[in-house]
Image (tube, rainbow, N blue to C red):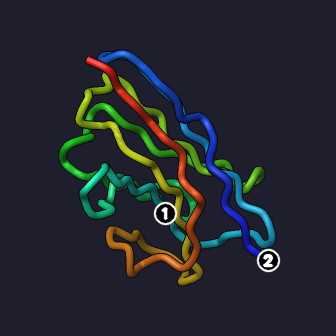
Amino acid sequence: QVQLVESGGGLVQAGGSLRLSCAASGRTFSSYMGWFRQAPGKEREFVATISTSGASTYYVDSVKGRFTISRDNAKNTVYLQMNSLKPEDTAVYYCAAANRGNGLGITINHYDYWGQGTQVTVSS
């Protein structure tokens, strides 16, 4: 059974940093992966995606220059380094994995597996 387990969330002051991790088990993911987030009362939104090799990435405009997605295929883990955090980054962050080959995924429908989410709270 496929499992994605996120970790690294927490409470941080504005301007601070957090590093989220997502460990995949049950199979090796040879496809793109991504991070999404959902704030209270809002729909789940795309944050970042990374290709199978890690050579290509894509971000939502609001996090460009502040967040960095990376992956370690030997550990079957994807990361999201978040710097210069803002209160509007507060949300539950979800890791997502696909079973669809190469490319990048920027919508919920591009993904097949989801983690349980980890809370990120940024205080002002």
Q: Residue 1, labelled with which disc? A: 2
Q: Is residue 33 left or right of residue 85?
A: right
Nearer-N-terminus badge (1/2): 2
Q: Residues within 10 Å of mark 1 (few under 14, many from 20)?
A: many
Q: Looking at the picture, does residue 12 appear above or below residue 90?
A: above
Q: Looking at the picture, does residue 60 appear above or below residue 108?
A: above
Residue occupied by mark 1: 51
Relative to the observer, which residue lies in front, 39 or 99? 39
- Helix, strand or loop at label 1? It is loop
Q: Quadrant of residue 89?
A: top left
Whether label 1 touches label 2, CB < 8 Å: no
- Helix, strand or loop at label 2? It is loop
Q: Position of residue 123 (x, y in %)?
A: 32, 21
Residue at image position (59%, 61%) is 115
Q: Position of residue 90 (x, y in %)?
A: 33, 37
Q: Is residue 115 left or right of residue 64?
A: right
Q: Quadrant of residue 101?
A: bottom right
Relative to the observer, which residue lies in front, 111 or 87? 87
What's the residue type where badge 1 is placed? Ser
What's the residue type where badge 2 is placed? Gln
Q: Looking at the picture, does residue 26 appear above or below residue 14?
A: below
Image quadrant in which the N terminus is located: bottom right
Residue at image position (59%, 34%) is 8
Q: Position of residue 19 (x, y in %)?
A: 53, 32
Q: Label 1, label 2: how many angstroms apart (C-alpha)?
A: 23 Å
Q: Is residue 48 left or right of residue 31?
A: left
Q: Is residue 91 left or right of residue 43?
A: right
Image quadrant in which the C terminus is located: top left
